[in-house]
Amino acid sequence: RWDFEAIERRVERALAVNPHAVEALAWQAAARFALGAEDAAGALIERALAISPNNGRVCAIMGDALSGMRRFAESETYFRKAMAYDATAANPRTELGMMYMQWGKESAARAVLEEAWKLDPFNARTKTPLALLDRLDRFSEIGDERFAIRFDPAHDEIVARYFARHLAAIYDEVCTAYDAKLARKTIVEIFPTHTEFGVRIHGRPWIHTIGACTGWVIAMDAPRSAGDLPGPYAFAEVLRHEFTHTVTLAVTHNRIPHWFTEGLAVMQEGTPRPVDWARQLADALRRDELYTLKEIDWGLMRPKKVGWGLKAYAQREWMCGYLIETCGPD
């Protein structure tokens, strides 16, 4: 997650020095788009391309930012423009491929990643997801018209059947909670190594979590002990948490603050607030150390003190509870 208000402030300083800095204009457009001023963002991109026509870097910046916002269709448009403007650039193809993987379009991801590899056969950022796609081709799949569970048949067939049974049991309940009718299948991929899970989510093997959702795709570590896997965990809670992200992202068309979708996902787990969380929240309240609304999204990613990452999760859930108690669930 990016701090687009901080980006806006920095870019304004840069443009005060050079109002024709096209990369600064691209970053300003990304910030404006993220902050809800989509028409202004488009005008800034037009201004940048008028200064430097056919500038692939301008479009790649927008494509990357939109991908981070899970605005996949808009991101694809800008990455495609970047590729058209510079046929020799590998990076826009690589980042488009990573975006396609998060979007659940793996065949499209392979096509552009292979193009990028031909242009730059030394880029680990390209090679790593290509190797993972080869691995995914060997996965098996079970499911129905609502979801697809993909797994390594040599290790996780039994686990996958438990996943499918639980997702079938919660599917209608979670969708009904948000008046959602999902337009496509939810893809759940179970990874037999934590390294592969990390690559699947961010293209990098060092991701310190066991489950993640990018919209229509949910990736999870296999809940067992082997190799670099973290070991057994309450997969039913994690699967419900991540599926809640899929639903809330879908019904808002990915226009939902990160703290809000996280808080709702924690609430949907259906377990009481842990005592440690309650103590941490009470202590933070007493010390005037609760996160502000502007700080809460960064509280998990960049905690200021040891243990404050969990405090961010706890406070997100508390904030959602406050909204429901104050305004009602509707």
Image: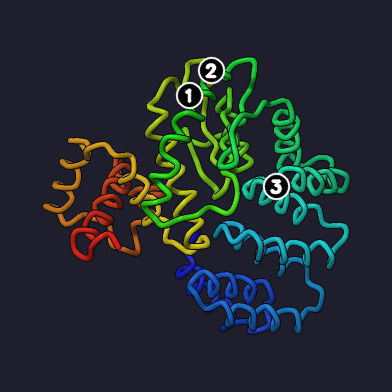
Residue mark closest to the camera, 1 vs 3: 1
Q: Amino acid at mark 3?
A: Lys
- Residue that mark 1 sits on: 162
What's the CA distance linking mark 3 and mark 2?
26 Å
Q: Give the left or right position of residue 177, taking residue 85 as reference.
A: left
Q: Amino acid at mark 2?
A: Ile
Q: Are marks 1 and 3 in contact (CB under 8 Å)?
A: no
Disc 2, SS? helix
Q: Are marks 2 and 1 in contact (CB under 8 Å)?
A: yes
**Dot 1 surroundings within 10 Å: few (below 14), some, or many (20 or more)?**
some
- Residue that mark 2 sits on: 158
Q: Position of residue 182 (x, y in %)?
A: 53, 52
| Residue at (70% x, 47% y) in the render | 105
Among numbered discs 1 and 3, the one appearing first in the sequence: 3
- Residue that mark 3 sits on: 105
| Residue at (59% x, 29% y) in the render | 195
